[in-house]
Amino acid sequence: MSTVDLTAATFEETVTSKDIVLVDFWAAWCGPCRMFAPVFEKASAQHPDIVFGKVDTETEKGLAGAAGISSIPTLMAFREGVLVFSQPGALPAAGLAKVIEGVKGLDMAAVHAQVEAEHGAAATR
């Protein structure tokens, strides 16, 4: 599967309706972004079970702001609608492979329980 462009209109639905979604926040003027793009594209071809989305931070400034993007490229990984990884900087192919392996290997029952516990603790403050 090739990468898909995500916008403010499609971001939330994509992240919440798919099992695993990797999102690359980038801009055309960003050198490290241009270096990471072929790595991200190649990984998308190797993992058709994962959605590989790209957000152009120049055209989607509101979305980038809402996501707290302060440095690009930034890679975010969502699993079952939960943000499970976020890191700025261009990753080499081996680094991206480790992220994908880690996200696939997560115990999502434990992740969901942790999220619930954090939301419960925040609500009682």
Image (tube, helix red, strand yellow):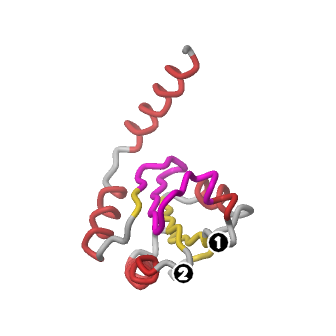
Q: Is residue 38 visible?
A: yes
Residue under label 2: 29
**At x 47% / y 27%, what residue is drawn?**
118
- The amino acid type found where label 1 is placed reads Glu
**Residue 93 lies in quadrant:** bottom left
Rendering quarter of residue 48: bottom left
Q: Position of residue 50 (x, y in %)?
A: 47, 68
- Residue hosting label 1: 58
**Residue 42 showing in the rendered view:** no
Nearer-N-terminus badge (2/1) = 2
User: Label 2 sits on what residue type?
Assistant: Trp
The residue at 62%/61% (across/down) is: 14
Callout 1: 10 Å neighbours few (<14), some, many (20+)? some
Above or below for 16 versus 56: above
Whether residue 94 sits left or right of residue 88 in the image: it is: left
Q: Which residues are magenta?
A: 64-86
Task: Tell me residue 92's x, y (percent).
Answer: 29, 75
- Element under label 2? loop
